[in-house]
């Protein structure tokens, strides 16, 4: 069908502005269709009838969507034609309708099946066609047999996994009291909606067995839990696929919570030449006030982009409750194929591709299967620190799960770092950067149970950031280690369970280091700033209005705008309770290239050099035993991509002249 002259120009990506009133007044059928779609979506949010309202032209973006950009309101509206219908306008792309997993019609299940079949046929995501089953699996009743728990030992067969939120309402569980009956049959009436949907989905895929954590681990047996949790890496890695109830807050939500309504606006009718059309439109980008609401044509929300933390994406967290859970992080990364049931659509991750039903998924999800594998040792260490940063922003019901919930990924990483020892969350071959974690956010009350040695991030109840990965490109670390001041001697951790990468009961780090005594106090009687002083050189915690980092700062430079030397305490509440001698243990000096970050806040030539030292409290003076209580940072901005050594020559570190090393043990 022919287009008017303005519509012909709308495929030109250079852009043309025009008055909104033109869409309504023109004789062009396509212009009027676009007008109807915009009115249906924006009214009454945007004053679309304003005489001064002008809009840029339509443009085809790289995803082949037909978008209307409304820059005045920060809005993009996408238009497309439904799959299988006649589209009178060739400039519109075609997308498949999002239906339900249970639908036998062309829709979501067939889309998922195509993704799976394409992966199996063309990718190298899994070479284990017939793996050994986990200790226990659930029989899906594929052949009409009862749904029940099955002993999987020594049996080789294909199986799938379910990733789900437990929520406030505990799911159906296997315990020492009911395991015998579960081995006979699990009555359908007792199975929650999410489990039912996953079992039915497994049947449609012709998969006989499914692994569900609450059913396949004896929940009131600490011994069984320890043994089975240590096998998590193999359980998820060997599965055919993991299906994730991403939108369900507990086991009652089911897999089809994402398909209870369609988010797009439908424009159906017939053209003047009697040709039928079925056009869809919805927000591709929406104002923050409407992005999370069930408004007409609201945008399909996708999981978090890699340049965001959970706190950055806080408004969308309720849309993806599963992705806020710490345990799920490794489930997604370890599975060869991960199919998410989101609120609006299905999303696909495998080790070679990512897809979504709407075709607009951001290509840079954090730590996806496409990017998890690499061989270079420095990049592996960098990748691990980024994993830890993101993982520490997620939620765990029990703090003691901090190391167990990451143990599967630690095991996978150890296979690629065969020469390095895993030490309660950090690695022996990259201590110069792994030890430099900085806590932020509100204090957490210290529990009675041991979480990890003080030098490991696992001991902290707060979120953490690493200066060596902050805002850096995922595969291009923007940090150079200019100097290392310590010598690593040895370290060990005592495993608390059968899992060598799980909980620990003890940990010691022995190093030869430059050690400097500090004086503790406030800047003045009327100042709330907290000061660690070496001789006449003070290190300030924060200014009086901000005694600690309560949120993730946008860049490192802002931390040194008012005070060049900083104190970062691991536990703010204890700052007035330090009764032992306090020392600084000089570690390393780094150069951070600010122009390599996602957020180009500074002049392109700016770099920042920071010297980091551990802040230690002496526990045993005779044996030189210490525990970490924080981090000291001495930072300065320098000019030029390669840094400026003169800045350190003109104003050296206050520790520069005293470099005699002492052997110490940090617990």
Image (tube, rainbow, N blue to C red):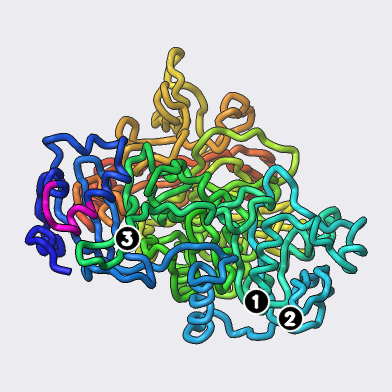
Within 10 Å of disc 2 (Cα), the crowding (few <14, some 14-19, many 20+) is some
Q: CA distance from mark 1 to mark 2?
A: 8 Å
Q: Disc number at residue 132?
A: 2
**Which residue sits at x=41%, y=36%?**
566
Q: CA distance from mark 1 to mark 3?
A: 42 Å
Q: Secondary structure at mark 3?
A: strand
Query: In the rendered structure, which disc, 1 or 3, sits on the residue that comes first in sequence?
Result: 1
Report x, y in % for residue 433.
Answer: 47, 56
Magenta region, residue range? 25-34
Report x, y in % for residue 196.
Answer: 71, 62
Decide if residue 278 is on the left or right side of residue 52: right
Within 10 Å of disc 1 (Cα), the crowding (few <14, some 14-19, many 20+) is many
Q: Secondary structure at mark 2?
A: loop
Q: CA distance from mark 3 to mark 2?
A: 48 Å
Indicate whether residue 633 is drawn in magenta: no
Between residues 421 and 451, which one lies in front from this camera angle?
Answer: 451
Decide if residue 390 is on the left or right side of residue 226: left
Residue hosting label 3: 279
**Which residue sits at x=50%, y=62%?**
99
Whether the residues at callouts 1 and 2 have beta carbons within 8 Å, the answer is yes
Indicate whether residue 27 is drawn in magenta: yes
Between residues 258 and 563, which one lies in front from this camera angle?
Answer: 258
Residue hosting label 1: 238
Query: In the rendered structure, which disc, 1 or 2, sits on the residue that comes first in sequence?
Result: 2
Is 105 above or below relative to 26? below
């Amino acid at each position: 069908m022919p287009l008017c002259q303005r519509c012909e120009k709308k495929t030109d990506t250079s852009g043309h502005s025009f008055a909104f009133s033109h869409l309504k007044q023109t004789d062009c059928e396509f212009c009027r269709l676009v007008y109807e779609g915009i009115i249906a979506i924006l009214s009454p949010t945007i004053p679309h009838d304003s005489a001064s309202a002008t809009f840029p032209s339509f443009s085809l973006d790289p995803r082949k969507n037909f978008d209307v950009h409304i820059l005045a309101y920060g809005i993009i509206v996408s238009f497309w034609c439904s799959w299988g219908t006649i589209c009178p306008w060739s400039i519109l792309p075609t997308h498949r309708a999002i239906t339900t997993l249970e639908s036998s019609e062309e829709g979501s299940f067939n889309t998922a099946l195509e993704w799976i079949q394409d992966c199996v046929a063309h990718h190298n995501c899994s070479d284990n066609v017939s793996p050994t089953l986990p200790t226990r699996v659930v029989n899906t009743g594929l052949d009409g047999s009862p749904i029940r728990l099955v002993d999987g030992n020594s049996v080789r067969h294909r199986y799938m996994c379910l990733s789900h939120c437990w929520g406030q309402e505990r799911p159906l569980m296997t315990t020492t009291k009911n395991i015998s009956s579960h081995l006979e049959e699990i009555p359908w009436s007792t199975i929650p909606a999410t489990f039912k949907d996953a079992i039915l989905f497994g049947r449609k895929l012709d998969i006989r067995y499914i692994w569900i954590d609450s059913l396949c681990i004896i929940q009131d047996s600490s011994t069984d839990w320890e043994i089975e949790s240590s096998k998590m890496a193999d359980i998820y890695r060997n599965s055919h696929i993991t299906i994730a109830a991403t939108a369900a807050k507990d086991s009652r939500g089911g897999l089809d919570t994402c398909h209870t309504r369609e988010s797009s606006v439908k424009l159906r009718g017939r053209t003047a030449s009697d040709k039928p059309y079925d056009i869809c439109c919805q927000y591709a980008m929406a104002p923050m006030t409407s992005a999370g609401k069930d408004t007409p044509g609201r945008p399909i929300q996708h999981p978090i982009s890699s340049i965001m933390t959970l706190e950055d994406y806080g408004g969308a967290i309720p849309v993806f409750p599963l992705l806020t859970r710490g345990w799920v992080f490794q489930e997604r990364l370890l599975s060869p194929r991960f199919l998410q049931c989101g609120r609006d659509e299905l999303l696909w991750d495998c080790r070679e591709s990512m897809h979504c039903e709407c075709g607009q998924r951001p290509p840079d999800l954090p730590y996806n299967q496409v990017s998890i594998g690499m061989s270079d040792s420095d990049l592996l260490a960098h990748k691990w620190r980024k994993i830890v940063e993101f993982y520490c922003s997620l939620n765990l019901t029990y703090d003691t799960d901090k190391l167990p919930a990451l143990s599967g990924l630690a095991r996978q990483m150890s296979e690629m770092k065969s020469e390095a020892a895993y030490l309660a969350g950090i690695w022996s071959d990259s201590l110069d950067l792994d030890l430099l974690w900085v806590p932020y956010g509100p204090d957490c009350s210290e529990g009675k149970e041991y979480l990890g040695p003080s030098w490991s991030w696992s001991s902290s109840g707060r979120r953490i950031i690493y200066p060596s990965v902050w805002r850096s490109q995922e595969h291009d670390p923007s940090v150079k280690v200019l100097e290392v001041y310590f010598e690593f001697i040895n370290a060990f951790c005592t495993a608390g369970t059968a899992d060598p990468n799980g909980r620990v009961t003890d940990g010691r780090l022995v190093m030869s280091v430059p050690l400097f005594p500090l004086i503790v106090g406030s800047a003045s009687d009327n100042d709330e700033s907290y000061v660690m002083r070496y001789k006449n050189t003070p290190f300030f915690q924060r200014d009086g209005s901000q005694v600690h980092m309560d949120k993730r700062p946008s860049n490192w430079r802002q931390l040194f705008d008012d005070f060049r030397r900083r104190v970062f305490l691991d536990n703010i509440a204890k700052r007035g309770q330090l009764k032992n001698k306090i020392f600084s243990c000089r570690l390393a000096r780094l150069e951070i290239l600010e122009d390599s970050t996602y957020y180009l806040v500074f002049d392109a030539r700016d770099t920042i050099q920071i010297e980091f030292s551990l802040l230690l409290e002496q526990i045993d003076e005779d044996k030189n035993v210490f525990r970490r209580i924080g981090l000291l940072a001495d930072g300065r901005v320098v000019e030029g991509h390669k840094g400026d050594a003169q800045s350190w020559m003109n104003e050296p570190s206050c520790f520069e002249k005293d470099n005699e090393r002492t052997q110490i043990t940090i617990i």
